[in-house]
Image: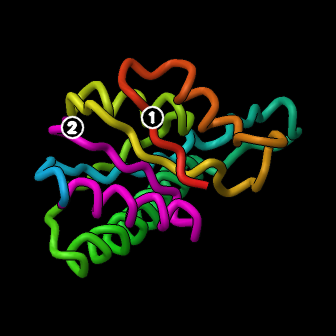
Amino acid sequence: MYKSILAATDGTELSGLAVEHAVKLAKVLGAGLTIVTVTKPPPTISSAELGWSVPVDLYEQCRKTDANRARKILADASSVAARLGWAAASRHVAEQLPYAGILAAARDTIADLIVMASHGHRGLDQLILGSQAAKVVALAKCPVLVVK
């Protein structure tokens, strides 16, 4: 049925449940599993808007912080897969909006199923489905399993 599953996580408890669900499904189906996390681009700040200049290394510091956080999120998710007895690849998509990074990872890994939580860091952005999840559902080329 599914040969390549992509599980998206942002490190929240709910996305952890989605990862666990994806691992169990991959194990039952004998499917490959890739766990992805996406970090947003650093905010763009114009010196003219602030009236002072932005430190040159500010953006690099943001990127390093995001990369470290992504490594932790992926390590935690990979340990869930290992605990459940299934190997998973991991991928960090940097400097993208979450929905776009998830869709890019699905395309790059040739995923035939995306598993993700109904909402992430910002809680319930909309009454039923978080805005990033809604965009993935609307734009994905493959089925999307939304874990509530």
Tell me the quarter of the picture where residue 86 sits: bottom left
Instruction: Report the amino acid beneath label 1.
Output: Val
Question: Which callout, 2 or 1, points at the residue further toward the start of the chain?
Answer: 2
Picture residue at 50% right of the left edge, 34% below the top: 96
In the picture, the quarter occupied by the C terminus is bottom right
Picture residue at 55% right of the left edge, 52% below the top: 117
Picture residue at 57% right of the left edge, 20% below the top: 138
**For the residues marked 2 and 1, what is the alpha-carbon distance in whole angstroms?**
12 Å
| Residue linked to disc 1 | 144
Query: In the depicted view, which residue is nearer to us: 110 or 68?
Result: 110
| Residue linked to disc 2 | 2
Percent position (x, y) of residue 106?
A: 32, 32
For residue 143, side relative to residue 127 (left or right): left
Percent position (x, y) of residue 125?
A: 79, 44
State the extent of the magenta-drawn residues as a range.
1-27
Q: Secondary structure at mark 2?
A: loop
Percent position (x, y) of residue 128?
A: 77, 41
Question: In the figure, 144 relative to 38: above or below?
Answer: above
Q: Residues within 10 Å of mark 1 (few under 14, many from 20)?
A: many
